[in-house]
Amino acid sequence: MKKIQLTDKSFLKCNTIDFNLFNEEMSIINELITGIKKRENYLVFTPNEKMFFSLLLQTLYKEETINFKHNKQPEKRLEVLIITKKNNMKEFFLNCTVNSNELFLLCNRLHHHLGFCNIDDPYFARVYWRHLLYKYYSGEIPSEVPLHYIYPVATGYHTLQTISRGNRNLLGRKDSQPPTFNITDNIDKLKDRSIKYDYVFVDCSRIKKNISNFPTGTLFFFNSPLDDRIVYLQRYNLKQYLLVGDILKSINYQESCNIKQLSQEMFRKSSINSVEIEYVSSNFEREIERAIQLLDVLKKQRFSKYDVHGVAKLIYLFIRMPVNAALYDLIAKLQPYEETIRDIMQELKESDYRYENDSFEQIIEMLEDILYKCKLDSVCPKWEQLKGYLLKEYSCGKSICIVSPNKIAQLALKEMLSISIGVSLSDMEDNGIFFVLANDIINEMKVITCDSLVIYSSLNLSDLSLLLKCNYKNARVYLYNIEINLLINKLKTVIDVENYALKHFEIRQGSVGNIYIYLFSRLNRFVRQKKVNQDETLSKLMEEVTQSETYLLREFREYKGKKAVTGFLVYFNDNSLAFFTKNSRIQVLDKKNKRVIRKRFKDLCIKDEILFIDNDARKDIYNIFIHSIENMDINKKLYMLIERWRELYEEKFLESRMTDEKLYMKMRTIGWEKTTKSILRNWRTGYSYGPRNKEDIILLGKALEIPEFINNTDIYYNAMSKVRVERRRASRILNKIIYFSNKKIDHEEIAMIENYNLSVEQLKESLLIKTVKNIELNRGYRIKPIEMGLIFGSMEKE
């Protein structure tokens, strides 16, 4: 192991990162730099994120010292595109320096290679740094100069702006070449071929968006081996360096115990153990498989997208949910924007196309059979198997953490377990039983330590990545046949790839195990035991189902579910449309006072300009801010505290079989003076950030018998108040973005935006302003609550 030492005097230096890299890692970096220069594509996984930063600096050094001699335009400076969280990378480069003496030696070498260069031509500034720095520093050149003075750094989203180089950009004005490092969060920059970059690096550890297109000569960096994008990238021609599993044990760490500990830490971050996969047998496996196959037939026939989406959603729910359909629906009814299984099923049965297609009719019959003949409506195979294990672990006094993919499933499972062990929902954690949402672990919002970790569904590798992020003694994963099939198919694509990292390690004979082999062997044993039939075609079709579940469609038909609301159509100048209810309060631009106001639907007029945030008129701008935070800073902690308050409220509401009407009457009897019942629902659903006065928190605690609200009133109230202050600051920034130029946004506001890992450009991209063309007041449409306030391109009958 050694420090990054690019020359004897260290040409490049970082003041915030101590680059301790193993010899094996250094060897890989050198090979990568050579390969990318040849326009080859790479996929690199390593738990050591420092390797990525080191790769960037060493790429620069090698280009400056060796590669320039072989370039077609040796006088042109290196151009690198880096897709990552720009604030983190910007901070890294601003803390890097260049050794002055080494820089001047490089300038001499370059000058000798190029020959005559006009000292007055800013294009050749990179040859005359001694002269330029001498003038800038008035003859007293420091031994180390900020890296971005010499190798400019640009950041942005759509448009990249170069960071000022020196006081009032004096050095920047003497250099006319493009920036060396171009840093952006915008992964769509990969599609922009207007600039031909020398190197392209994509930091997939920080950028979570999907990858669809990229230029040759791109390197993808991952810090988790269980990232589904790794599977996706297997369809492309990439050389892969996977520093995972047993090869990390072969690192030569004889120098010190600390180095050995570092190697072991890297191994821990890329390996799992004590994981048992449990196959859950169900009597509806064939029906699920056949429904998936018929769904593919409907897609190929270009059948109604709306109905195809409904079928896909039901299949997805049947596989994912850990409880029976009746209980799932009971919980879903309490969520204002969630559909029940019964309502989705009823909508499919009443489809205009039901009797026009035999495959569709067969699917409906199969879905009904799953619910009623196979009794998923009253009995869930996963719960029956989960129950025995959870009760056993609970009786042994072990701490248990149960991971859920969504909120409804979590609440439903909580309810079932609460009844089974005779403990109230609010006392679960005191008894060592914890429920957590998968995304909270993946996004590192919660740190989990427990004896037994339980995952009851996995349709992708990311679901299993939780195993790398939790501290547990034993873990169990409960899967249906179709889930095992899907995961085996995904693992097969990566398990046999050629790993170019192997040759850089002294691998002990037979020591080639890794996380992919570990999981594959545990899943594949059910195939060997003939409990599961491996079907690659079915797996691919199921993967399409999981992808289609996430979006929303609308057809020219009215919704007949129990939660249907009456919406009125608003048409816009671009022929798009949206639904609003009579009670909707809509964000509208007030040009006279240069601000955004809320108008009641009845006051909406032709030519009014409506503000949509992420295509949703209901969305608040602060949601963009809070969900962009990577780390648990103070604002995220306050927001999570409000979420915790809401969770306790919702659990007690469910446990008491309460309704808004009952709760309202109970609140009134103990002295609550407000007259609007909807406030109670707004607090519970997250539409608002909770009560605006302490007394309301106390009264709610008394009405629902939640001592936590009474004992910690100040904590919750202060969190709500501070988040509202942040929201108001975000709203002021929103007004400036809409009505004024970026220059009106002051330094304090820019700092706030950057603290939330955002940029003005990103905020602008989330905003959409549409002008009202017509309001259809003479006819109301029955729509789903979730469809209210969303933009639809059109509503044509297929």
Image (cartoon, helix red, strand yellow):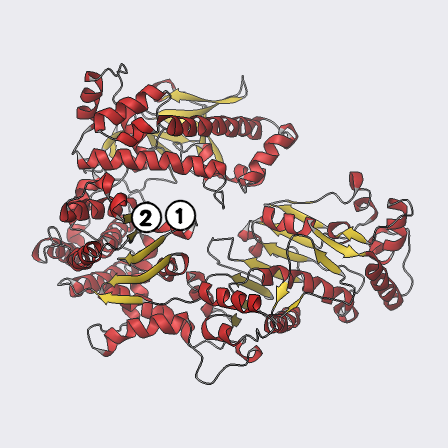
Q: Which residue is mark 1?
A: 446
Residue 372: x %, y % from top left: 9, 53
Tell whether 123 sits left or right of 549: right
Residue 436 numbered mark, or none: 2
Which secondary structure lies at badge 1?
loop
Residue 442: x %, y % from top left: 41, 52
Pick whichever of labels 1 and 2 is earlier in the sequence.
2
* Quadrant, the N terminus: bottom right
In the rendered image of this protein, does residue 241 appear above or below residue 571?
below
Q: Is residue 415 visible?
A: yes
Tell whether 502 sits left or right of 492: right
Residue 301 figure quarter = bottom left
| In contact (CB < 8 Å): disc 1 and disc 2 | yes
Q: Is residue 576 visible?
A: no
Residue ID at (40%, 50%): 447
Q: Residue furthest bottom?
A: 509
